[in-house]
Amino acid sequence: MLALTNIQTVPLQKSPGSHSGPSVNRAAAVVETDIPARLDSLTWGAFHTRVIAALGITWILDGLEVTLAGALSGALKESPVLAFTNTDIGIATSAYLAGAVIGAIGFGWLTDRIGRKTLFFVTLAVYLTATAATAFSWNLASFALFRFFTGAGIGGEYTAINSTIQELVPARYRGQTDLIVNGSFWIGAAIGGLGAIVLLDPNVIDPEWGWRLAFLIGACLGLVVLVMRLWIPESPRWLMIHGQPERANEIAAAIEQSVAPQERAASRSYPKMRLEMRTHTPLREVAMTLFRTYRSRSLVGLSLMVAQAFFYNAIFFTYALVLTDFFAIPSAHVGWYILPFAAGNFLGPLLLGSLFDTLGRRTMIALTYSVSGILLAVSGYLFSIGVFTAQTQTIAWMVIFFFASPAASAAYLTVSETFPLEVRALAIALFYAIGTGIGGVAGPALFGVLIDTGSRNSLFAGYLLGSALMIAAAIVAWRYGVDAERKSLEEIARPLAAQE
C-alpha cells in the first residue's frame, strides 16, 4: 500500500492567492499528501465504472422526467382540469428553471461546505418528492410550484455530480467522461419519448391519467438511484482540506484496489502538496477568487452557460409546441419525434467526447458552439420560409444538437475544472444559476409567447438570438479558454489552501 498521508501541525501561513486571510485558527494543521497525484495517475478501473453508472443513471432518469414534461405539453393543454395555454406551459417551464437556479446556489454552497456525498441524497430526495407531487397538480399554480421544487433538486444535482466527476476521474479521462455522463440525459429522453407515446395513447389510458402517471413512474424509478448512490464515496480531495486526511487516504487506497497491482506498487512515488486544513471557505474569498483572481475564466464560464442555457431550454422545452402548432402533429405522436432528437443529443458527446481530451478544450468548445449557432440560424431561416416538414425539421434539430449537446456539457466541464477545489461546487452553482437565470428562465417563456403569435418569422427571430449567443460564446472561449485537457485539477487551478 502507498504511504499514508502525513499530518503535521505548523504555524499557519497565508496561502498563495488567498485574499481574505485564513479561515481556520492560526495553529491549524497542514497536511502533506500525494492523494491528488495518485488519483490522477490511475487507469480506468471497476470503481470508476460503478461511479459513472450511478451518476449516469441519475441523468437518464432526469432526462426521462424532463422529456415527459415537454412531450406532455399537448396533453396539458387538452387536459379538462388544467387546460394550459402555450404561455402557461412557458410559465411552468420557467418556474422549473427558476427552482433550478435557487437550488443550484443553495445546494452548491452546501456541497462545498458539508461535502459531495451528503448532498447527493438531499438533492435526490427533493427532486423525487416534487416530481411525484406534480402528478397531483390541480391548476397552474400547483403545477408550477411542484415544478419549481423539482428544478431545485436538479440544480443541486448538477453541482454535486459535476464536482464528483472532476475529483474522482483520472485526468486523462475527465473530459470524455464528463461529456458522456451529462449526455446520458438523452438516453432518458428517448425512454421518455417512448413513454409518452404509450401514456398519451387514448386507446391505452385516458390522457388525463396518462400525464399524471408519467410523473409518478419517473419518481418511482428514481428510488433505484438512492441505492446506487451508496457506491459513491466522499471526494478524497474534499476530505483532505476539510480535516479528514485519514478517511481520505482510506478511500483513495480503496479506489486503487480496483486497478492493476502494478499501478499501486509501494515503490512508486508521487509528487506531494501541502494543504491547509479548513472548515470552510469564506464567501468573500470565494468572490475574490471567482471575480478577481480568475476573472477571465469566469467570463468564459458565464458566456458558455448563458448561451447553452438559452439555446437548449428555449428550444427543447417548446419542442412539442412547434410540432403541434406549426406542423399539426397530434400530441400523442410527439414522442416519435423526440427519439431522433434524443439520439443526436447522445451521439454528440459519445462520438466527439474523446476529442475534448485530444484536440483540446478550446478547439472543441469553439467548434461545437460556433457550428451549433450557424446551423440553428440556417435551419431557422428554412423553417421561416416553410421549407421544412415535421420530419425534415426533426432531422435538422438532430444534426444541430449533435454539436450542441457536447457544447452544453462542455460548459459544465469548463466551470467545474478551472476553479480551485474549495469553490468548485459553488462556482458550478453560480454560473449555472446565472446562465439559467439569464438564458434559461427567459427563453421558454419568450418562445412560448413567440409560438402563440403563430408567426414563423417571430419564432425565427428567437432562433437568431440563440444562434448569436452561441457564436459569441465560441469567440470568448477561443480567446480566453484554458487548455485543461489531460492536466490534474491542481495544475489547472491551485487549491486556495495550498502551501509552499
Image (cartoon, rainbow, N blue to C red):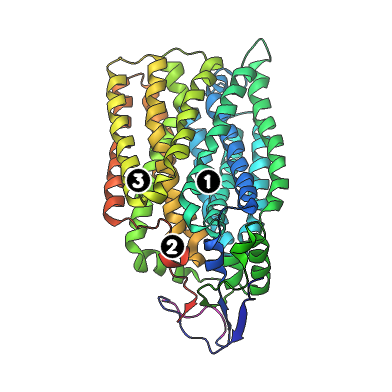
Please name whichever residue, 219 or 375, is drawn nearer the observer in this view of the structure.
Answer: 375
Kindly report which numbered mark, 3 or 2, lies closer to the viewer in this rendering.
Answer: 3
Whole-angstrom CA distance, mark 1 to mark 3, is 27 Å
Q: What element does badge 3 sit on? A: helix
Q: What element does badge 1 sit on? A: helix
x and y, in percent, of residue 83 in the image = 56, 21
- For the C terminus, the quadrant is bottom left
- For the N terminus, the quadrant is bottom right
Whether 211 is drawn above or below 360: the answer is above
Mark 2–mark 1 CB contact (< 8 Å): no
Report the span colored magenta: 19-25
Q: Left or right: 224 with respect to 286?
A: right
Of labels 2 and 1, earlier in sequence is 1
| Quarter of the view holding residue 372 | top left
- Which label number is shown at residue 419? 2
Kindly report which numbered mark, 2 or 1, lies closer to the viewer in this rendering.
Answer: 2
x and y, in percent, of residue 170 in the image = 52, 57
For badge 1, the amino acid type reads: Ala
Determine the residue positioned at 45% across, 30% down.
344
**Outermost residue, top direction?**
203
**Outermost residue, bottom direction?**
11
Kindly report which numbered mark, 1 or 3, lies closer to the viewer in this rendering.
Answer: 3
User: Does the image show residue 136?
Assistant: no
Determine the residue positioned at 55% across, 87% down.
26
- Which label number is shown at residue 364? 3
The 10 Å Cα crowd at callout 3, few under 14, some 14 to 19, many 20 or more, is many
Q: Which residue is mark 1?
A: 100
Q: What element does badge 2 sit on? A: loop
x and y, in percent, of residue 450 in the image = 36, 26
Q: Left or right: 231 with respect to 156?
A: right
The tally of labels here is 3
